[in-house]
Amino acid sequence: MGQDQTKQQIEKGLQLYQSNQTEKALQVWMRVLEKTMDPAGRFQVLGCLITAHSEMGRYKDMLKFAVVQIDTARELEDPDYLMESYLNLARSNEKLCEFQKTISYCKTCLNMQGTTVSLQLNGQVSLSMGNAFLGLSIFQKALECFEKALRYAHNNDDKMLECRVCCSLGSFYTQIKESMKIALQHGDRPLQALCLLCFADIHRSRADIQTAFPRYDSSMSIMTEIGNRLGQIQVLLGVAKCWVIQKELDKALEGIEKAEELAEGLGNKLGLLKLHCLGEGIYRTKGQQRELRDHVVKFHECVEEMELYCGMCGESIGEKNSQLQALPCSHFFHLKCLQTNGTRGCPNCRRSSMKPGFV
């Protein structure tokens, strides 16, 4: 298959995909991959396959094609192709919750600055890296990455990237209906799962438990199908909170136990922190002192590991209703502590402070 025929078949696949004939589009692209002699065409069709499998939640297949694309990019000896393929490799590992690998591949992308496509892809690189840091509960670095991604989205008028960054920042409660429309229009199952989870959380916060449960079930079904273990933790946590509201404490503990196993496997400290906090409250109600102490100890271990305390007074952040201040380096402190100290730099990393943000 020559260059012109390859281009025509790729376009045919795109038309099928855009008309929601996904399986037919995949068949066309796979035939192109098998028959084309054009390396650039092979790279392009691999990109189509990666995107399609990502939106369908088939992350293992997504990773398989990303690995092949890396080899094709090396064959082409073009830095633009290489950067794009490393980003796809990073995104594949992010979806599979391989967060350390994601960060490593994103750093490789960022070290390739100066390529023609780098300005177009930097926002996606920053978002993927931010999601990985968030999965590892490294909040300062996650916040820095999300802010960079949002700047790229605004500068390039990239609405889809902006939507994804807002989802990651947890601020799309105000945009949830629009996000679900976008997810349904694009057949984006991972985004649908996140939207369903947020709907469920909203119903739970309103004590509408009977409406929340089916939303959680639907979200869990998609999260399980696509292998999103981080999302499964969030769903199990929400369901456990529903059982607590209904005073079904044993059922809540079952959910916590399953979520703990997933969180420990991923190294997700934030998930563990929330689970230990919820477990502490349940065992306090049940009067089981040994289990209560175990969760208290583990809760404080998570606080220490994530540095969730003011670097000046040493008190845990969030225990009291105190105003916080975020410095440009993304370290957080009590506002009153910084005002008392009078420092112009960050007490943690000593970077100079310019304009703080209030939380």
Image (cartoon, grey):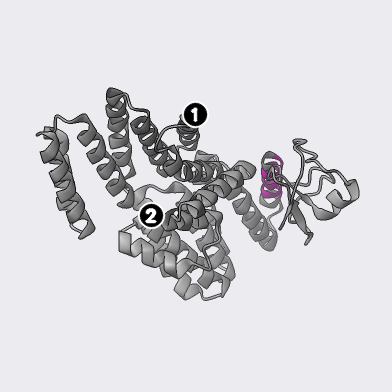
Front disc: 1 or 2: 1
Q: Circle 1 is placed at which residue position?
A: 111
**Which badge, 1 or 2, comes first in the chain's sequence?**
1
Residue 171 lies, in percent from the top left, at 55, 61
- Within 10 Å of disc 2 (Cα), the crowding (few <14, some 14-19, many 20+) is many
When the figure is inspected, residue 290 is found, relative to residue 196, above or below; the finding is above
| The magenta segment | 293-304
Q: Where does the image place residue 100, in percent across and percent down from the top left?
A: 50, 33
Q: CA distance from mark 1 to mark 2?
A: 29 Å
Q: Element under label 2?
A: helix
Whether residue 254 is visible to the viewer of this picture, yes or no, is no
Residue at image point 36% right, 58% down:
221
- Secondary structure under the numbered disc 1 in the rendered image: loop
On residue 190, the disc is 2
- Residue type at tag 2: Pro
Depth check: 87 or 353 in front? Answer: 353
Please identify the quadrant where the C terminus is shown.
bottom right
Asked if the stretch drawn in magenta spans residue 130, the answer is no
Task: Specify few, some or many for label 1: CA neighbours under 10 Å numbering under 14, 14-19, or 20 or more.
Answer: few
Residue at the (25%, 35%) spot, across then down? 43
Residue 194 in view here = yes
